[in-house]
Image (tube, rainbow, N blue to C red):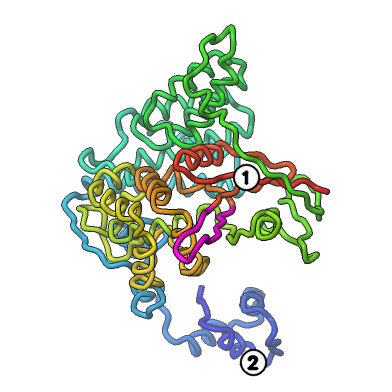
Amino acid sequence: MCTFACLSDVSSILLSRSQNCNSVMRKDDLVASLLSAYEDGLCPLLPDLILRIAGICARITSKAELLIWRAERLFFLNGEQNLSSFLLVDMGVVKYPTYSCIVSDQIFLDRNDLLAYEEAMEVAQLIDQALDEKDDKMVLRCVSVADSRVQPNQCTTSESVPFFSCFSASWIYSKVVSLGVSFLERENRYNDAVLLLKRLLNCYTRDGRRGYWTLRLSIDLEHLGYPSESLSVAENGLLDPWVRAGSRMGLQRRILRLGKPPRRWKIPSFAESIKRKITEVRIQGRPLNHETGMKSRFYGESGEQCSVEQLALEYYSAEGGGWQGVHSESGIWLTIFGLLLWDVIFSDVPNVFRTKFQTAPLDFGTDSFYILRQNSIESQLQKIQDGMGEEILITSWESHKGTSCNGVNWDRHSLAELRAAVTCIGGPCMASLCRHLAQDYRSWSSGMPDLLLWRFNSEYSGEAKLVEVKGPKDRLSEQQRAWILLLMDCGFIIEVCKITPC
């Protein structure tokens, strides 16, 4: 089927057929009108009319199309980029960072390894489509195929380069099985979900997803009426170094709830820590809606509709203490982290950069990121701790403005806002936060408090506060609770602001 270059081409064909052409019609509607006329035999010369305007057209074979797809997959190592990336760079639409590509190891061991990976990707695409279309039979079929091909000790394609594991067929199949677990849980098929979770935990002993799998296993066992086994799973999970952040918090809270006498008589050592009091502030607002499942909306001071976060910002800027701030969640922190550690992120490390079209190294978000750069990361964090954060931020902003980098959003926050945040947070807290992101970006890149507030005491010093905002029916997630306690340990001032209807 020919794809018309522009609306005027379609209009020209309609005019050549002496039909009225409504200029306000959408291009898709005009094309549908032409194709309908051709299929009904009213316009047998349509192909000739198209060729006269579009020129010579060629259609590549399915084999050639597969070859191009495979070349793109091998080159870009993802399903998002294609050959248009070269054009976008040449046109100046997209700018990638400058770094060195030092390749010493191959991602795929041989052709069979690549073909197995491609086959796994097809299964993953099928289950995504089946979930969207609510095709339960196809979902279960994909899960069955993936489950049969997940084997113990097949976690990585290369033991010497562990962050290549996500390019293995086994890793892709584990994603499919994880989707299957969520599907089975929604269907209340907890026995089947438990079997899949146990297989995943048995096969993938060094994986950042183990925390999620362990938490789900403990929850599903309780659903089945096995509280003692659920408790044992949670306790063993805390001994696993791959169980982190929100998942770890969730398991600790389950242990405190399930581990009461007579199941357990000893109070866990972490009980006092996670039961720490979190400062709460309550403010009232005039609600706009009370509908279940909808995000709470309120009327602000000006009488206009606003979210709970905007209502909280209004409170903190006035009677709440004269704070300035932004509704940031994790976005502003990832931007600051990217700017402060830019030179470290794009430093010369073997095998992490394979093309000139990457926005982050391949090991970004894995344990390898910190391990391979520990000295340079700690050196940069020391500068931040010593008060050089604002200077580093300004230099990085001016040097790389507009360049694509994972986590950095150039448009959402101004340089003035970022400078204020870094200055008022202070070196020690900022360095501590960046260290946690560098060590485990995957676990800590989400769940940060909603608001970042600051106020200056002088031109070069100030204070900051982080606020998690909750509507009338909202409660803290395990990830949010884990962040709050971590930030308290880092020295941040933090509180929960609860909005109640007046």
Which residue lies most toward the front here? 458
| Residue type at numbered disc 2 | Leu
Q: Is residue 470 above or below residue 390?
A: above
In the depicted view, which residue is nearer to us: 174 or 228?
228
Left or right, 1 with reference to 434: right
> Hey, which quadrant is residue 360 in on the image?
bottom left
User: Measured from the top left, where is residue 346 in percent x and y?
Assistant: 28, 59
Question: What residue lies at 42% left-to-right and 30% top-to-bottom?
Answer: 200
Q: Is residue 53 above or below residue 309?
A: below
The residue under label 1 is: 134
Question: What residue lies at 42% left-to-right and 80% top-to-bottom?
Answer: 57
Which residue lies most toward the top here? 262
**Dominant secondary structure of the residues highlighted in magenta in the image:** strand
Question: What residue lies at 71% left-to-right and 90% top-to-bottom?
Answer: 20
Cα separation, mark 1 vs mark 2, equals 43 Å
Q: Earlier in the sequence, mark 1 or mark 2?
A: 2
The residue under label 2 is: 15
The segment highlighted magenta reads 451-464
Q: Is residue 138 visible?
A: no
